[in-house]
Amino acid sequence: LIAGSTALTLTAGLAAAQTVGFSQIGSESGWRAAETTVTRQQAEERGIDLKFSDAQQKQENQIAALRSFIAQGVDAILVAPVVATGWDAVLEEAKEAEIPVVLLDRMVDSDKELYLTAVGSDLVEEGRVAGRWLVDEVAGAECRVVELQGTTGSSPAIDRKKGFEEGIAGADNIEIVRSQTGDFTRARGKEVMESFLQAENGGKDICALYAHNDDMAVGAIQAIKEAGLKPGTDIKVVSIDAVPDIFLAMAAGEANATVELTPNMAGPAFDALAAYWKDGTMPEKFIQTESKLYTQADDPQAVYEQRKDLGY
Ligand code: AHR
């Protein structure tokens, strides 16, 4: 029997349930809600006691949640960091308390020694995939693009912007003419798209929309329709996440492509934690998930049918 070890918490020959604190950003998108659902399911399947905290999009709430988890002496912390900066102090406190922290789906700019691992996709590559898709799709024709960015200061907003710009680099026919945050929400995506349409000759001067997530794209599609244009035809739509609603839009011909981000970040995170708890095995610093492109060629209606009951 081992006592006082952070890696092993066996008592009287029985494995005690591990307690994990999860600081979630909020529920700004369908993808985010799915990640929460999947994380709860993954914890339940493994007999992990998950303490859930919803930060309502505020970093200060996330920091307070992490401090509360540390005070409770949880066995690990999962955090989906709303923005990339400002985490050093609280991560140092977790390290001091010997509580491993795993980042989910977004990155921070802190020293890598301050967290155990990060599970996520290559966010820059997601943007590149979307950009390259557009280059092929327009095949040399002039294309004025509007961009809906994610939450300002978040790693997906920074990296997906960079990646898209890299993906279209060298294609002189493609130009990003407007770019603004829609905060990853459907409502803001619609509002900002309305202002883009107004500023671009009622939308007639826009060839494509690149949205950093599907929810903003779905909001924008509504705005395009209300402006009397056909999304997917008059304005091409490419976005990221691969949530069921974008496949519905694709099946209706109103969206063209999406890049998948799996909502199952918790599975690989709990696997890494299980190995760490067992014998102190250190995981890779970054556990990467896939970034698959879906287009009209992938039978969007069939994909929608497969995914619609997954709770997102
Ligand atoms: O961090 C991942 C992003 O956050 C997802 O693409 C978006 O939908 C979410 O809210």
Image (spheres, rainbow, N blue to C red):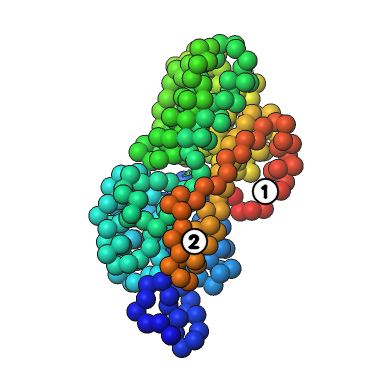
Along the horizontal axis of the image, is 257 left or right of 187? right
Q: On the image, numbered disc 1 is attached to which residue? A: 307
Q: Please, what is the three-letter code of the amino acid marked with disc 2?
A: Ala
Residue at 51 percent of width and 21 percent of height? 168
Mark number displayed over residue 197: none
**Res 37 seen here:** no
Residue at 47 percent of width and 35 percent of height? 124
**Res 213 seen here:** yes
Q: In the rendered view, tell whether residue 243 sits above or below residue 280.
A: above
Residue at 48 percent of width and 71 percent of height? 278
| Front one among 1 and 198 | 1
Q: Residues within 10 Å of mark 1 (few under 14, many from 20)?
A: some
Secondary structure type for disc 2: helix
* Residue 310 x/y as whole percent: 64, 53
Secondary structure type for disc 1: helix
What is the residue that sits farthest to the left in this orientation?
89
Which of disc 2 and disc 1 is earlier in sequence? 2
Q: Please, what is the three-letter code of the amino acid marked with disc 1?
A: Arg
Mark number displayed over residue 272: 2
1 vs 2, front mark: 2
Q: Residues within 10 Å of mark 2 (few under 14, many from 20)?
A: many
